[in-house]
Image: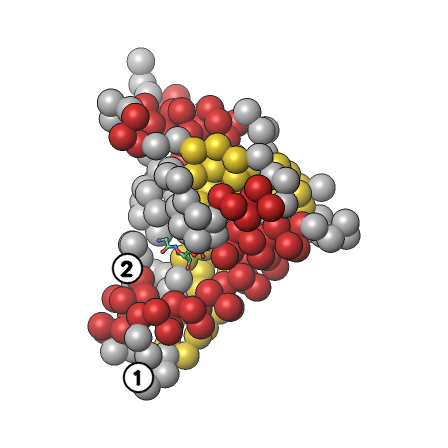
């Protein structure tokens, strides 16, 4: 059984979908902890399912790197096989990514490489494209640039607001993230081997 830490920043509807899936004894993954960068409303879902949570707030640290180091320590305390960013709205610092990738995945509300960043739904609407969607990908050191694992298309409808479209994307997204996790656990999606020497390359000393 794959053990997972989920990172969130907001409402946590994707987290909830994962918790509900993992509540089935036949699901091949367990959520061992949920982490956040703020007092996110979605942490209530963790509590409702009896899953421990932790919060590491950036303003409590001198810089992004030391915030990332503490977040990494909190995550690693659970020795997860996989870390899932599900609406985690901060860019993860290089040491965090190097320590966990490729066992670090993210769900993004667009068809990457189109519309990376924090406003993917708004940007897709503004671009006037006919369709957008969901991407689950491995997190690398860029912003939404890592290898794509799964994508699913969501049509944009006439009159869609950002809220409407994001809600329709999230319905699909919950299904995509749950099945991506299931596929990783069952090795139908095989993540590459970790590059164990990467940290040394990053911190030549
Ligand atoms: C999701 O749509 C997720 O893809 C998006 O935030 C939403 C979180 O919803 N993430 C990003 O935009 C990351 N760039 P949730 O809190 O209800 O799961």
Q: At 47% across and 52% down in the image, what residue appears?
A: 12
The C terminus sits in image quarter:
top left
Question: At which x and y percent is residue 79?
Answer: 59, 29
Which of the labelled discs sits on residue 119, or is there none?
Answer: 2
Q: Which residue is mark 1?
A: 159
Q: Earlier in the sequence, mark 1 or mark 2?
A: 2
Q: Name the quadrant containing residue 8.
A: top left
Q: At 33% across and 79% down in the image, what residue appears?
A: 160
In the image, taking residue 112 as reference, residue 102 lies left or right, namely right
The N terminus sits in image quarter:
top right
In the image, taking residue 47 as reference, residue 71 lies left or right, namely left
Q: Any atom of ligand 1 within 8 Å of the CB at mark 2?
A: yes
- In the image, farthest residue toward the right: 26
Q: How many marks can you see?
A: 2
Measured in 3D between alpha carbons, the distance from the residue under mark 1 to the one under mark 2, in whole angstroms, is 18 Å
Question: At which x and y percent is residue 41?
Answer: 44, 48
Circle nearer the viewer, 1 or 2: 1
- Residue neighbourhood size for the residue with mark 1, other residues' Cα within 10 Å, grouped as few (<14), some (14–19), many (≥20): few
Question: At which x and y percent is residue 35?
Answer: 47, 37
Q: At 30% across and 26% down in the image, what residue appears?
A: 60
SS category of the residue bearing label 2 = loop
């Amino acid at each position: 059984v794959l053990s997972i830490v989920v990172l969130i920043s907001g409402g946590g509807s994707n987290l909830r979908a994962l918790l509900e899936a993992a509540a089935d004894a036949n699901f091949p993954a367990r959520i061992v902890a949920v982490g956040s960068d703020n007092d996110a409303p979605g942490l209530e879902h963790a509590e409702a399912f009896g899953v421990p949570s932790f919060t590491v707030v950036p303003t409590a640290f001198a810089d992004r790197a030391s915030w990332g180091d503490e977040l990494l320590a909190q995550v690693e305390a659970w020795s997860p096989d996989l870390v899932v960013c599900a609406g985690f709205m901060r860019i993860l610092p290089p040491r965090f990514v190097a320590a966990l990738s490729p066992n670090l995945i993210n769900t993004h509300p667009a068809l990457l490489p189109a519309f990376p960043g924090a406003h993917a739904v708004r940007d897709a609407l503004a671009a006037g494209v006919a369709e957008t969607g969901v991407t689950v990908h491995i997190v690398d050191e860029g912003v939404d640039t890592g290898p794509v694992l799964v994508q699913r298309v969501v049509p944009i409808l006439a009159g869609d607001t950002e809220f409407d479209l994001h809600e329709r994307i999230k319905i699909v997204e919950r299904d995509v993230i749950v099945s991506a996790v299931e596929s990783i656990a069952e090795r139908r999606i095989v993540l590459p081997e970790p590059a164990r020497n990467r940290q040394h390359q990053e911190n030549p000393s």
